[in-house]
Image (spheres, coloured by chain):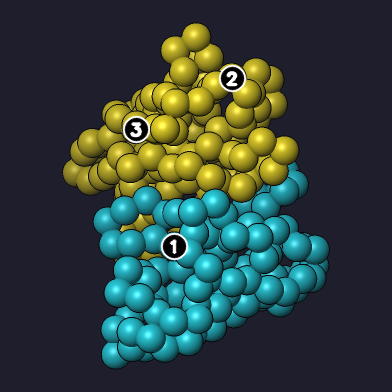
């Protein structure tokens, strides 16, 4: 199975900050990488797919990059709504779809 | 608007069984793969199983093969997860999720989840 590892596990930041979360895959997954945001007590929401394509309706302050085994999610200017937990996930074949362990973005 | 509504969770004793349901609306259900994803309290997301549009192709995470069974009824726009021989570690919120067409495992819509608690 492909192991997805995110860093950091927790990130403290302020409204207006630029933040970056990293996700590493244990083997190459090309660009088959998605990012989700999960607010407390809610279901995850798809933000980015194919490593860098913004899902419809997602604000442009979110961006993704990377290919192969290393990927990043960047939020250019944090808004209050962005304090949540973020997960990366590989997809697009029938091996188990694995998620990273999550990065909790907290208010500093 | 796409809607997925799970039901069937609850408190069950170790060794017990539950049948989780997910009712879909707002899209042509029979055109999509569907998945179940679970999340233990305070933990991350874990994919459980998925099922092809016609129900003829199914995959499970290895650790749940034999105890969990996914199925669907396209006439009722519903997907199900039968969970047997439940253990404390199966305690989690179980989400159903729609997989985007032509993108296996890309979850573009999620339900609100149903909580399964395994405890004596």
Say which quarter of the image contains residue B22.
top left
Residue, x 49% and y 59% (percent of image)? A58
Q: Chain of mark 2?
A: B
- Dot 3 falls on a residue whose secondary structure is strand
Q: Are marks 3 and 1 in contact (CB under 8 Å)?
A: no
Residue A40, horizontal then vertical, whole percent:
28, 62
Closer-to-camera residue (B48/A60) = A60
CA gap, disc 3 and disc 1: 20 Å
Give the residue at mark 1.
A37
**Chain letter tied to yellow:** B
Residue B108, horizontal then vertical, whole percent:
53, 45
Say which quarter of the image contains residue B60.
top right
Return the mark for residue B6. 3
Closer-to-camera residue (B2/B59) = B2
**Chain letter tied to cyan:** A
The quadrant the N terminus of chain B occupies is top left
Q: Is residue B38 above or below residue B100?
A: below
Describe residue A1's horizontal placement relative to residue A16 as left or right.
right
Give the residue at mark 2.
B30
- Residues tagged by mark 3 and mark 1 found on one chain of the structure: no
Closer-to-camera residue (B66/A75) = A75
CA gap, disc 2 and disc 3: 18 Å
Q: Which dot, 3 or 1, sits closer to the camera?
A: 1
């Amino acid at each position: 199975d492909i192991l997805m590892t995110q860093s950091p596990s927790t990130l403290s930041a302020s409204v207006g900050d630029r933040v970056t979360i990293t996700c590493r895959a244990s083997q190459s997954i090309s660009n088959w990488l998605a990012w989700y945001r999960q607010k407390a007590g809610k279901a995850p929401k798809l933000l980015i797919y194919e490593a860098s394509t913004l899902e419809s309706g997602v604000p442009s302050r979110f961006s993704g990059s990377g290919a192969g085994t290393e990927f990043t999610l960047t939020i250019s200017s944090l808004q209050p709504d962005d304090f949540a937990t973020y997960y990366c996930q590989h997809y697009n074949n029938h091996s188990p779809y694995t998620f990273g362990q999550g990065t909790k973005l907290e208010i500093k | 608007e796409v809607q997925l509504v799970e039901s069937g969770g609850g408190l069950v004793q170790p060794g017990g069984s539950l049948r989780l349901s997910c009712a879909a609306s707002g899209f042509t259900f029979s055109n999509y793969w569907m998945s179940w994803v679970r999340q233990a309290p305070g933990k991350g997301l874990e994919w459980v199983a998925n099922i092809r549009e016609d129900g003829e192709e199914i995959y499970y995470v290895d650790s749940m093969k034999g105890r969990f069974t996914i199925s669907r009824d396209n006439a009722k726009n519903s997907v199900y997860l039968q969970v047997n021989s439940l253990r404390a570690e199966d305690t989690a919120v179980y989400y159903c999720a729609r997989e985007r067409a032509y993108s296996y495992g890309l979850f573009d819509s999620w339900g609100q989840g149903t909580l399964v608690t395994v405890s004596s």
